[in-house]
Image: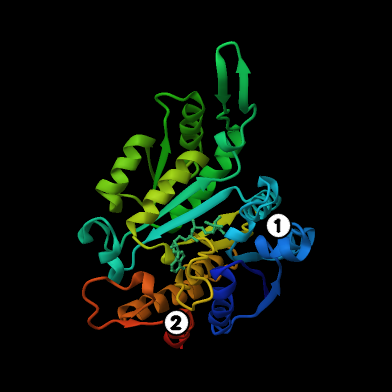
């Protein structure tokens, strides 16, 4: 069966990295049909809007979307609703991508890059599952009003039972396929909405007897993530807590150039993109690390294209390249570089292709 992948290179290093990653995918020998579309700043210049309707139509028709990155200083002064990031948000809501998967995976050769002690993070492999389309970021009413007491700002933290249930099911399914442990994070001691979160997660657990479930308050979860991160397998939480905790978990690995992400809808259609942005400071210099996008492509193989063995193969190739000492500038250690070879974006991708062969 042909895998229909919509490729959106985007802006800055996104556009620079993507052709290399497509070559990596092509070298797997799978039946891909790649289509291309515009999003973000590049789309504003070409079509006058960050999300052209034809991009969303093509995304809906594809099995998965692989995105580079969007944004850049040349679009920063546009009104908020016309900026490149608006295209990304439109894509997320247009495809109803409610489940955001952010792995924090630390390849052992890079353990030195973490701000934590090597033994705490070497071979770290945790997955944060964040609810992406609800919670306080979208709740109504919201705003700032002026009354007799001065200005008053307010937001609404709201979750429907069905929103909690569907993200819980995604997380339980993933925990079942991994190490069988799920931690649900809330603030049920203070916020009623997250007491509902805890209750619904507990109810869904009845369908997953093989998964060990525990609950943590968000403050404790943040502490545990930096104290003993390897205690976690899959973590599930709402939109705001997930936003913060996934960045904490990401930084345990110490390197933005290595972090992939996925956002899925109920049909397992997904948007796959590196966590990093368009990095205008290094764009066009052939020094950007392509591995976050390569690892996002591996997630695409696993979660949307049902090619888990090929996803493993790609991740093993990345590990082999790192074991060999091949490094882009961002993951080159400052101190000892013995046995290491500094390469550009193109050579890193070529090294992955060679390792696959
Ligand atoms: P950034 O992630 O682009 O860059 C932060 C720092 O990390 C920079 O010093 C950059 O050089 C470095 N870096 C990032 N990716 C790297 C890679 N693959 N290899 C080596 N070094 C890398 O974040 P920023 O500078 O805050 O934002 C730049 C632009 O990207 C902004 O317009 C922002 O809005 C946008 N952005 C887009 C996304 C996205 O597309 N999802 C995410 C974050 C930021």
Q: Is residue 100 above or below residue 199?
A: below
Ligand 1 is within 8 Å of the C-beta of the residue at disc 2:
no
Badge 2 local density, few (<14 within 10 Å), some, or many (20+)?
many
User: Residue 268 is drawn in which quadrant?
Assistant: bottom right
Q: Mark 2 against mark 1, which lies toward the viewer? A: 1
Q: Secondary structure at mark 1?
A: loop
Residue plotted at (46% across, 25% down): 191
Q: Are marks 2 and 1 in contact (CB under 8 Å)?
A: no
67 or 77, which lies in front? 77
Badge 1 local density, few (<14 within 10 Å), some, or many (20+)?
many
Is residue 309 visible to us here? yes
The image position of residue 100, as x and y in percent, is: 53, 51
3 or 288, which lies in front? 288
User: Residue 18 is drawn in which quadrant?
Assistant: bottom right
The image position of residue 313, as x and y in percent, is: 45, 77
Residue plotted at (44% across, 72% down): 289
Residue 46 left/right relative to 336: right
Q: Secondary structure at mark 2?
A: helix
Residue 173 left/right relative to 252: right
- Residue highlighted by disc 1: 50
Colour scheme: rainbow
- Residue highlighted by disc 2: 352
Q: Is residue 218 above or below residue 235?
A: above
What's the distance in space between the residues labelled 2 and 1, CA to CA? 32 Å
Q: Quadrant of the N terminus?
A: bottom right
144 or 266, which lies in front? 144
The image position of residue 330, as x and y in percent, is: 37, 70
354 or 288, which lies in front? 288
Residue plotted at (45% across, 84% down): 347
Which residue occupies the extreme top position in the image? 148
Mark with earlier residue (2, 1):
1
Residue 220 left/right relative to 89: left
């Amino acid at each position: 069966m042909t895998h229909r992948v919509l490729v959106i290179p985007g802006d800055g290093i996104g556009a620079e990295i993507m052709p290399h990653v497509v070559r990596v995918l092509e070298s797997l020998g799978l039946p891909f049909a790649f289509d291309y579309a515009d999003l973000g700043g590049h789309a504003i210049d070409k079509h006058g809007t960050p999300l052209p309707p034809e991009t969303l139509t093509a995304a809906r028709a594809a099995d998965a979307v692989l995105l580079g990155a969007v944004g850049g200083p040349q679009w920063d002064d546009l009104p908020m609703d016309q900026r490149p990031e608006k295209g990304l948000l439109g894509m997320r809501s247009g495809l109803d991508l409610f489940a955001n998967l952010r792995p924090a995976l630390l390849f052992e050769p890079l353990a030195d890059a973490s701000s934590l002690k090597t033994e705490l993070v070497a071979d770290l492999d945790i997955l944060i599952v964040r609810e992406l389309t609800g919670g306080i970021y979208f709740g109504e009413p919201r705003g700032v009003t002026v009354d007799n007491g001065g200005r008053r700002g307010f937001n609404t933290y709201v979750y429907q039972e069905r929103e909690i249930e569907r993200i819980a099911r995604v997380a339980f399914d993933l925990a079942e396929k991994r190490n069988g442990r799920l931690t649900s994070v809330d603030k049920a001691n203070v916020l009623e909405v997250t007491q509902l979160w805890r209750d619904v997660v507990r109810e869904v657990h009845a369908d997953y007897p093989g998964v060990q479930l525990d609950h943590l308050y968000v403050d404790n979860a943040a502490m545990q993530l930096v104290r003993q991160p390897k205690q976690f397998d899959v973590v599930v939480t709402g939109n705001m807590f997930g936003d913060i905790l996934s960045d904490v978990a990401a930084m345990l690995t110490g390197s933005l150039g290595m972090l992939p992400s996925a956002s899925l809808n109920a049909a397992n259609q997904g948007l796959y993109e590196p966590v990093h942005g368009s990095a205008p400071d290094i764009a066009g210099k052939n020094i950007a690390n392509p591995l976050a996008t390569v690892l996002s492509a591996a997630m695409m193989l696993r979660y949307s294209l049902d090619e888990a063995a090929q996803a493993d193969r790609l991740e093993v190739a990345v590990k082999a390249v790192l074991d060999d000492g091949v490094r882009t500038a961002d993951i080159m250690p400052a101190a000892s570089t013995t046995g290491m070879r500094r390469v550009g974006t193109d050579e890193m991708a070529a090294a992955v292709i060679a390792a696959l062969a």
